[in-house]
Amino acid sequence: MHIDLQTINIKPLRQTYDNVARHIGGDKPATRYQEATLGLQPTSNFHYRPSWDPDHEIFDASRTALVMADWYAFKDPRQYYYGSYTLARARQQEAAESAFEFVEERNLCDALDAGLAAAARDLLVPLRHVAWGANMNHSSMCAYGYGTAITQPCLFQAMDQLGIAQYLTRTGLLLGGPALLDAGKQAWIEGAEWQPLRHLVEDCLVIEDWFEMFVAQNLAIDGQLYPLVYGSLVEGDFAGRGGIALSMLTGFMRDWHAETLRWVDAQIRTAVGESEANKALVQGWLDRYRGRARDALAGLARRASPAQADAMLDDCDSQFRARIAKLGLSA
Amino acid sequence: MDMKAAPKHKMGLKERYAAMTRGLDWETSYQPMDKVYPFDKYEGIVIHDWDKWQDPFRLTMDAYWKYQAEKERKLYAIIDAYAQNNGHLNVTDARYINTVKLFLQGVTPLEYMAHRGFAHVGRALRGPGPRIACQMQALDELRHAQTQVHAMSNYNRYYNGLHDWRHMYERVWYLSVPKSFFEDAVSAGPFEFLVAVGFSFEYVLTNLLFVPFVSGAAYNGDMNTMTFGFSAQSDEARHMTLGLECIKFLLEQDPANVPIVQRWLDKWCWRGVRLLSLVAMMMDYMLPKRVMSWKEAWEMYFEEAGGALFKDLARYGIREPKCMQQVRLEKDHLSHQVWTTFYNYGAAAAFHTWIPDADEMDWLSQKYPESFDKYYRPRMEYWREQAALGNRYYNKTLPMLCQTCQIPMLFTEPGDPTKICYRETSYLGDKFHFCSDHCKEIFEYEPEKYIQAWLPVHQIYQGNCFEPGTDPTAPGFDPLAAVLQHYHLNFGRDNLDFEGSEDQRNFAAWKGAVTRNQVG
């Protein structure tokens, strides 16, 4: 039965703010995402050049070689603004928390086969530093990028990567206590197997063009790391070797990657679809980092799972190529 | 790693939090640290040991998401209910809504700037502890900007002056005051930004900026603004502890930092005080139901609370900001001088102005026994008489602006409320004008910065504030009309007196519609 509750209706003078209306084709009801995002960043009449970058304005589209007619063409398919973002992550952290509780209460990490536990420790603990690098890079992209539509999700991504580094830290504590964190950091800094990746991560920290950084971090590094490490290795190989616990502890990363991949792809598609020049730029950036990331990760996969690594790498590589082809690029 | 025998070790909270944040950091070697962190040395601040940074709060991301989501859920439930129930009709008086306009035009954009500024500093500092704290603040500030935009969206649907706040922020003369303030901070180095925004703004002055608006909302039936204010309060508490930790950290690291920090405190307290003149006028004139006078707020929050703070910092060699004496002399005059200026320029402002009614004038006399009846009441009564005779005068000329704070030269000489204060200096053959010794001194320390200022009045005279195709030489050209068009300010709807405004008429009609039954 329909219940007809009455409220008093007053006809409004207008539906939304003009800065929003200009982006959505006139004055009509706007979503919270639209009001929180469209045209939010100041664009003109800046008073002073930044002392830390006097060649640019405070917000300046020329901090990247990418050229866009409208920087608000970068839409977030998840429609995240602060409120919807935190609500989504709060739900995910609840799921992650139950997974940690489940594993902790049953001491499932202590029950892992010795060889598997060692492989997991070797692989997962130093990755907290990779996530930390991604955190820094996304803070950069938020600070120096252009237009709230893309800078806002970059900060969300920065905080997500901090969260991931923290989940990996907790996983490390379960697998070997504080000493393992120190050992993992030492491996990251000195271990031969980690140097290609550390070298790449450090090179990315000093990339000056923020959209190049976006491509390097989100497509070349994380676009290959997440499916390989959290998919093929942890959820596939490790779980198959009795490491369901490891799969549970990294569930956040898999869900997160599946979700953020939609956002990353939408940004790349928008950038590439804008012009041939943009497409050439993005392709060049991808070419610059993709091979280095693949090779660095291949070494880690071979150590973690000598028998399965080659098949996994081939599989991940063909999936990555397919993804890149769908974006109108080649890998 | 052969770690199997690692003993189980229970970590303390502090140790655990350190593992979750600074433990993630490393000294880079493929890229030099100075290239990875290129911005944290040029200001002259010396940091010997970033590990001495005490994390002012320990919040891991999972906890952050959980707490903040809970706050968001509650806040949006109230915003929705307020809109559905036509909550805007419950405010004390439609004049109140002009404070909401001032807030959206002048404060919300600052929240956004803080968001981006903290993202920059949250990348720039080489210490991982403060970097994380700054990133969280960057995220919180985005929250504040967006919850304000959402909460005020409902006012925008029914009232004028809020419709193009973002466009106006970049152009309208009085909004260049907050805009230049924050751009001054963002364009400075990361440490100055922290002292300016994290400490001076969020710690020393927050009770005089954010709080008066929120308390004003609570006193005037605006549950909407009140709720986002209260919801932001726990974030603000975190920001205040960050600001305080930051200042102590800088002062403890090296004695060479003390004079640099002192100069920043002098500068930013004064810049803040000038910015707050907008709040002073809001508190004394724009709130139908007053919370307290500007002077009382100043005495309580700055002279008493701030005084105690600076006593506490004295052990580091920090003294109270230089401007204290002048502000003491100005507190009896500030709000009156600013409001009368807006009354004067009411044709060029995107909110309504009015002369206080008899009761309100009595309140002002009582709160300002030294100044109101002597200097300001007679002017206001005269203007009220003139308006009643049909001689309401709107000043359509352009005032001279202070090169530093960008406020029109409206303030009087310290100690002489009958004489406008003018200061000037020369730089590279040009003359620059200031409202005060403090603004002049700020300019003289960094003239190459402040000569860049985008001064709205200069820009109008240079022809930069007309729409494309405008011909200022055409016969009958009305410069004010052309400038307002460029501002997207609708003449007769967004500006002029409250009396006779569309806001006033609509509010009365709607209020009638929701409280009475229609007959016939």
Image (cartoon, coloured by chain):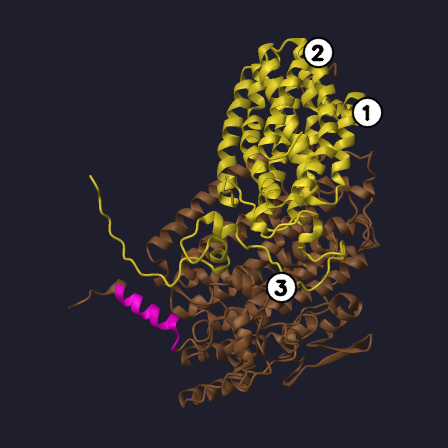
Tag 3, which chain? Answer: B
Please, what secondary structure does the residue beneath circle 3 have? Answer: helix
- Please name the residue that numbered disc 2 is placed on: A306
Residues marked 2 and 1 touching at CB (< 8 Å): no
Give the image location of residue B434, x and y in percent.
71, 76
Residue A27 as seen in the image, left or right of residue A290: left
From which residue to which does the magenta span run?
B500-513
Residue B58 can be seen, yes or no: no
Q: Quadrant of residue A129?
A: top right
Whether residue B70 is visible to the viewer of this picture, yes or no, is yes
Quarter of the rendering occupied by the C terminus of chain A: top right
On the image, the x and y values in percent for residue B317 come to 79, 58
Q: Give coordinates of residue B238: x percent, y percent.
A: 60, 47
Residue B268 position by quadrant: bottom right
Chain letter of the residue carrying label 2: A
Q: Is residue B254 above or below residue A195?
A: below
Residue contact between numbered discs 3 and 1, judged by CB atoms under 8 Å: no
Return the residue at label 1.
A190
| Chain coloured yellow here | A
